[in-house]
């Protein structure tokens, strides 16, 4: 029995995964508030593990593994969280602290990397996979044959900060015209200023209604996401690109225009056409807690045989 925690800015999504059942889908799931500051976040993480232990009947010390997916700068080798501003964590030995409270080793991973690994396991994917996280920002996790690829400095997949327009908007990272400024939730909010709680949804609805300005803004957004897909394919040549993150809830309303943009690129270039980019795109299944599943599996060896997906 493995336990994985996806610790986000407001909630902890925790799952138990039973290897013996032949599926990498959760068998139990609990959610709690994340809290703020190391004491609160660690305390709530311990409580999440204890609740799952109660549901599974497996004491924390007997769990096969406990993993954590968490945003920010993470050192998987030491379990130290360098900076997770929304959680109030700065240079915290999170893995060691949680392990000490639970009495069992803990693996800590960046949340996008954890989601990539979770998608690979739970969706029965094979070979090379990129998980394209379309949220407030833009980033990707890369899994090759079941193994995460973080890069020499942990920056593999940080495609949101690849500049694509020298005259573009200023990015939060300090550069100008980064891919994130045209392909993310924050990009949608900038392209379509609105008091609506979900600017991307409002933008796509307005475009579907025929609003001329919304159609132009949607084109910028969908072209930006298509650029991200093309960049991943050209840099890593992955077999599958899984679209996840908050914006994945937009479904085909978003992916439809993205595929149209990819088709236009293919029509203009026989080389791009040969890559068949649109066929590599899949949506993360609704409701799948990919980051929590990936955290649970972070300490597991790669499985070369595809596993069945429950349901």
Image (cartoon, grey):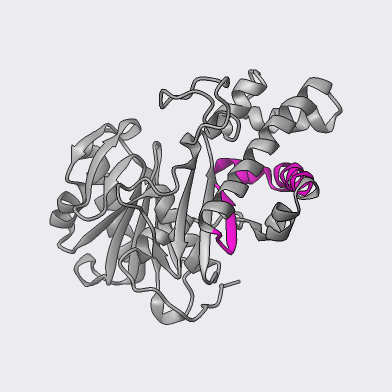
Q: In this rendered view, identify the residue nearer to me: 71 or 13.
A: 71
Q: Which residue is drawn at 55% across and 69% down?
A: 125
- The percent position of residue 225, horizontal first and vertical second, equals 63, 41
**Mark count:** 0
Residue 253 found in image quarter: top right
Which residue extends farthest right? 210
Q: Residue at x 41, y 23 (%)?
A: 174
Which residue extends farthest front? 270
Check if residue 20 falls in the magenta segment.
no
Apparent side of residue 165 relative to residue 57 in the rendered image (left or right): right
Point out the image quarter for the C terminus: bottom right
- The percent position of residue 257, horizontal first and vertical second, equals 76, 42
Q: Which residue is drawn at 17% across and 57% down?
A: 99
Check if residue 246 falls in the magenta segment.
yes
Specify the segment rendered in magenta: 237-265
Up-down relation of residue 183 to residue 156 (above or below): above
Q: In this rendered view, identify the residue nearer to me: 57 or 169.
A: 169
Q: In this rendered view, identify the residue nearer to me: 49 or 85.
A: 85
Apparent side of residue 309 relative to residue 55 in the rendered image (left or right): right
Point out the image quarter for the N terminus: bottom left
* Secondary structure mostly taken by the magenta-highlighted segment of the chain: helix
Apparent side of residue 79 relative to residue 7 in the rendered image (left or right): left
Up-down relation of residue 166 to residue 2 (above or below): above
Apparent side of residue 69 relative to residue 274 in the rendered image (left or right): left
- The percent position of residue 48, horizontal first and vertical second, equals 32, 53
The answer to whether any part of residue 25 appears in the image is: no
Up-down relation of residue 33 to residue 203 (above or below): below
Residue 189 found in image quarter: top right
Residue 92 found in image quarter: top left
- The percent position of residue 203, horizontal first and vertical second, equals 71, 28
Q: Residue at x 64, y 36 (%)?
A: 224
The answer to whether any part of residue 226 appears in the image is: yes
């Amino acid at each position: 029995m493995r336990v994985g925690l996806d610790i986000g800015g407001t909630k902890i999504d925790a799952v138990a995964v039973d290897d013996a059942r032949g599926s990498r889908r959760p068998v139990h799931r609990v959610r709690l508030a994340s809290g703020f500051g190391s004491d609160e976040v660690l305390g709530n993480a311990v409580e999440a593990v204890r609740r799952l232990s109660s549901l599974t009947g497996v004491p924390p010390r007997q769990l096969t593994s406990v993993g954590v997916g968490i945003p920010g700068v993470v050192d998987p080798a030491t379990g130290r969280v360098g900076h997770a501003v929304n959680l109030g964590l700065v240079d915290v030995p999170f893995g060691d602290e949680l392990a000490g409270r639970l009495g069992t080793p803990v693996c800590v991973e960046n949340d996008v990397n954890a989601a990539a690994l979770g998608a690979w396991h739970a969706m029965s994917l094979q070979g090379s996979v990129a998980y394209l996280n379309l949220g407030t920002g833009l980033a990707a996790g890369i899994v090759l044959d079941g193994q995460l690829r973080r890069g020499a400095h942990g920056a593999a997949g940080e495609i949101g900060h690849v500049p694509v327009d020298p005259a573009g908007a200023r990015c939060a990272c300090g550069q100008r015209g980064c891919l994130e400024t045209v392909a993310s939730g924050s990009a949608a909010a900038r392209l379509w200023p609105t008091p609506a709680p979900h600017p991307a949804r409002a933008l796509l609805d307005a475009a579907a209604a025929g609003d001329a300005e919304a159609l132009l803004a949607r084109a910028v957004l969908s072209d930006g996401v298509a650029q991200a897909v093309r960049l991943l394919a050209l840099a890593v040549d992955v077999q599958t690109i899984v679209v996840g993150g908050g914006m994945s809830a937009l479904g085909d309303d978003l992916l439809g225009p993205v595929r149209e943009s990819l088709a236009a690129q293919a029509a203009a270039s026989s080389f791009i056409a040969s890559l068949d980019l649109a066929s590599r795109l899949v949506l993360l299944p609704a409701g799948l807690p990919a980051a929590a599943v990936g955290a649970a599996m972070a300490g597991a060896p790669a499985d070369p045989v595809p596993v069945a997906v429950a349901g």
